[in-house]
Image (cartoon, helix red, strand yellow):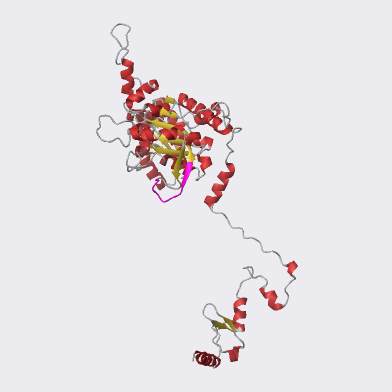
Amino acid sequence: MAEDTTKQNDQDDKDYEDVCYICRRPESKAGKMIKMPLPNNICICNDCMQKTLNTVPMGNGMPYMDMIHMGTMPPYEDVPKRQKLKRKKPQKQEAADKKKAEEVVFDIEHLPAPHRIKEQLDEYVIGQDFAKKVVSVAVYNHYKRVLTDSMDEIEIEKSNMLMVGPTGCGKTYLVRTLARLLQVPLAITDATSLTEAGYIGDDVESVLSKLLAAADNDVEKAEHGIVFIDEIDKIAKKRSTNSRDVSGESVQQGMLKLLEGSDVEVPVGAANKNAMVPMTTINTRNILFICGGAFPELDKIIKNRLNKQSSIGFLSDLKDKYDEDSNILEKVTTEDLREFGMIPEFLGRLPVVFALQAMTEEMLVEVLTKPKNAILKQYQKLLALDEVDLQFSEEAVRAIAVQAAEKKTGARALRTIIEDFMLDIMYEIPKDDLIGRVTITADYIEKKGSPMIEMRGSGEMKLLTERTGAIEQA
């Protein structure tokens, strides 16, 4: 029965002609059809197929199609080979390749001496000569120990550092500049988010996850990097508390194995161990840890220790002797840090302890003008893009430094002050294309006057009225 049905279908197919899918002519008029089973079992006549091939432009992959039909096809040996298409790299890829080509090979021969490291830091960091000297020597000894790998007889221990200094004195900026100059992986993390294992927050291993990400997931490169843990004073032991200290002493105890040097399981591409990501092992033996913190009220602990030696008499020290000492943190000792709340085991793994100086008015003036990326130079660059010359008088720079010193927040106060008085200028200057130069004066900083505006192409001077943005004839 099935065979009879199949024969009947074949007979029905023979009774119908194939029709061209394009011109709709039957096979009796258009000639033999070219059958294409894919995609829909269609038929195309020779004329439509030839017209389709003729519409293909020259140079788009079929340059010899017309030669084939005309019978002028050159020999196979004379046909030029197809050239590989050169794709233009994206702009970001070109910048990355250029940066990779400019990278300096970091080995023992290219390791700069401590005085060279300090000279490079001087171009960016103002003051803090003692801190820069300590960091330069510690980093030089650390990488000399890592790169030579000569520990057959005498094993050299690494020198982790603990820097103490008031806010805005340049702790984080110093480490960031150092890592950029040495071209080593750097991970900057905050100790405030670290908690004991099993509690909500980041585990101590998350510090190494950031370092691994900074090294492009290269374990060998990450094992020679630098980890800077900021706000380390926030994990001090909590005083007069009855609850479990999950973000204080327990975090210090969890960081002991990292500072000492051990194999740690770290998730790749995530900061949480519970994430469904692969794990890798990092040895922290050659990773340099630098901890920094402001340690508020540590100066009171130092004063109490120093005042214990005071007595009554003509030649005795007075109790208010150190009240006006802005650099009292330079007298810090391990005992002071223990009383602050740092456990002895933690301090023992940070052998290099030093303090940074508080920012004075003279240092703030230099911060405004001397570094390569000084704040004033940044604003001059911004207005230079609008073809406007921005100038600051010496009295104006001094006035900015005085106001910043009064805020007692270090160099961070400089940008706050500058953002305040530059708001109207950055808003009004792009309105007028004739403005060629703007000079910031001390009266404008102190809100007693206006900056001087010089028009382009003439010596005419105009004043920008305070806080209104209106320009009036001088």
Viewer-side residue, 195 vs 105: 195
Q: Residue 109, how many percent across, how many down?
A: 61, 32
Residue 189 visible to the viewer: yes
Question: Which of the 4 image quarters holds residue 466?
Answer: top left
Q: Main secondary structure of the magenta part?
A: loop
Query: What stretch of residues is rendered in magenta?
Result: 272-281
x and y percentages locating residue 66 in the rendered image? 67, 75
Q: Residue at x 41, y 40 (%)?
A: 205
In the image, residue 468 above or below residue 4: above
**Relative to 473, does residue 155 appear above or below in the rendering?**
above
Residue 278 drawn in magenta: yes
Q: Is residue 111 magenta?
A: no
Residue at screen point 36% across, 35% down = 251
Q: Residue furthest top?
A: 314
The answer to whether any part of residue 326 appears in the image is no
Could you tell whether 31 is left or right of 80 in the image?
left
- In what quadrant of the picture does the C terminus appear? top left
